[in-house]
Image (cartoon, helix red, strand yellow):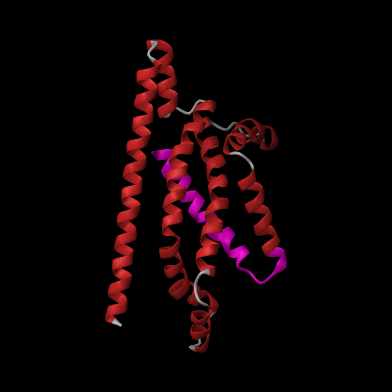
Amino acid sequence: ILLTICCVVISVVVGFFISLLGLSDRKLLVAIYRTYVEVFRSIPPLVSIFWVYYGMPILVDIDLQPFPAGMIALSVYGSAFMAEIFRGGVQSIAKGQFEAAYSLGLPYFNTMRLIVFPQALRRALPAIGNQLVITLKMTSLVSVIGVSEVLRHGNELAVTEYRPLEIYSFVAVEYLVLVLIVSAGVRKLERKLGSDERNNRSGE
């Protein structure tokens, strides 16, 4: 759970700033955005985990522990998807809203902050929730580098207790329960934001 929270927070923050490159009118920034997204979406997360854990210490001469190594690898992978989610959410906003904001004298930053991003976030919430669930399930991959998470404990118990059917079944149920809880929370938040938006419209 801790690893999931860390990865999602980092992915959202990094993905948000990367998405700004994709929304730029400058070809160089758009090219950087596309390169980042295509590269990190194309590399399997397990390969990223191995590369960060075994490769980065060679490049930067830093001894990475398993937890931060797994967090970096999954966060970079997730940020590429988050960047696409944010970019798509912003581009779904009607151009007329941009034009109306500019006609009122709002600068670009305030237009994005006050008008565009709140709406884009509501529209992107289902995709963000889906990415959260995917990240939660992908945390099982970090067991290969020794992070003490659910699957790692299951492997250790299976070796010592010789009851793999019961143990791995319990691991599967535990992931199922966690995913259902997260999915229910995301749906509740979607309903709340949708209700707030309807109330705002009715108030107008």
| Rendered view: 120 above or below 153 | below
x then y, percent, for residue 125 = 42, 58
x 67%, y 38%: residue: 60
Quadrant of the image containing the N terminus: top left
Side (left or right) of 135 relative to 83? left
Q: Which residue is drawn at 46% across and 67% down?
A: 120
As displayed, is residue 24 above or below residue 70? below
Taking 194 as reference, is 3 above or below it? Answer: above
| Residue bounds of the magenta highlight | 1-29
Inspect this view and state whether residue 76 appears: yes
Q: Which of 191 and 86 is in front in this view?
A: 191
Residue 158 or 63: which is nearer the viewer? 158
Q: In which quarter of the image is residue 15?
A: bottom right
Residue 16 sits inside the magenta stretch: yes
Location of residue 193 in the rendering, given as x and y in whole percent from the top left corner: 33, 64
- Percent of width and height locating residue 153: 41, 23
